[in-house]
Image (cartoon, rainbow, N blue to C red):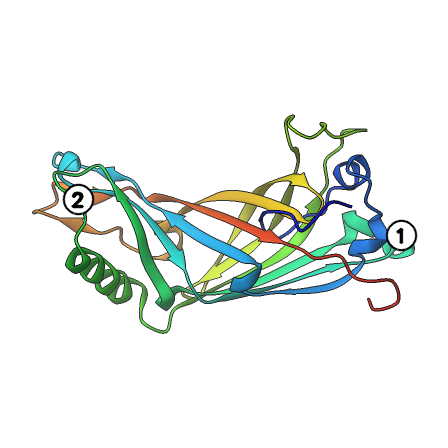
Amino acid sequence: MTGPPDRGPAGTLDLAQVRAYGGAVADFTGTHELRPGSGRVLVKTGRAGLAARAGHDLTLEIVRWSARVTVPDAEGGGLSAATVTAELDLGSLAVREGTGGAKPLTERDRRDIQGTAGKILGEAAKATFTSSRVIPSSSASAAPAGGTPAGGAIEGMLTMRGTSRPLRLQVVSPAPGQYRGSATVKQTDFGITPYSGFFGTLKLKDEIGVEFEVTIEEIPNGSA
């Protein structure tokens, strides 16, 4: 194995990819507890409306979150039987970047955005995800280093503000232990009214992007 990988998303373990990089599937068997030190979760918003040019496309980070990834051994189903759960504290959203707009974001803008998000979502708002199916890559062999990363998906239910909806997370694994993924969430599916300002001429798009990356460490033999 090479040194510690970069970071990649919470979730799926790709058998073909692990083999391609010389790792053993057994190295990842067991339960992995993930925290912000293991990676990060980002929310990306877009603009709509007649005054869209005046607004910003935002990148926000969910600062407080946790996840658990459990990978059974081969007799228990292996990678395809893996499970993923996550809890996200939506009250911990922090503005990391704003692109576009009539002028750059100021620190006051960032505080105002975070305050508005708190009012819309509720200060104690949380989101949870529970997987129902993990789909490793079906490819027989993964791309070599520098090639296209192997991919997979995690299907499950996202629950927010008392409402649950199906969610499919697309995941890539550029190297053993690295997982990066993304999904699209429609705010109105969860009873959230997208932000609207300037008398409705500047709005957030209903669909927002969720991106995440984590590193899952190998479990030493005998400690799973």
Q: Secondary structure at mark 1?
A: helix
Q: x%, y% of residue 27?
A: 82, 54
Marking on residue 125 = none
Specify the farthest residue to the left: 199
Choose the circle earlier in sequence order: 1 or 2: 1
Q: Nearer the viewer, residue 49 or 142?
A: 142
Question: Which quadrant: the C terminus?
Answer: bottom right
60 relative position to 154: left or right: left
Amino acid under disc 1:
Ala
Q: Residues within 10 Å of mark 2 (few under 14, many from 20)?
A: few
69 relative position to 159: left or right: right
Residue identifier under label 1: 74
Q: x%, y% of residue 63?
A: 42, 63
Residue identifier under label 2: 104
Looking at the image, which residue is at 83% across and 69% down? 223
Above or below: residue 94 compared with residue 202: below
Looking at the image, which residue is at 39% across and 64% down? 90
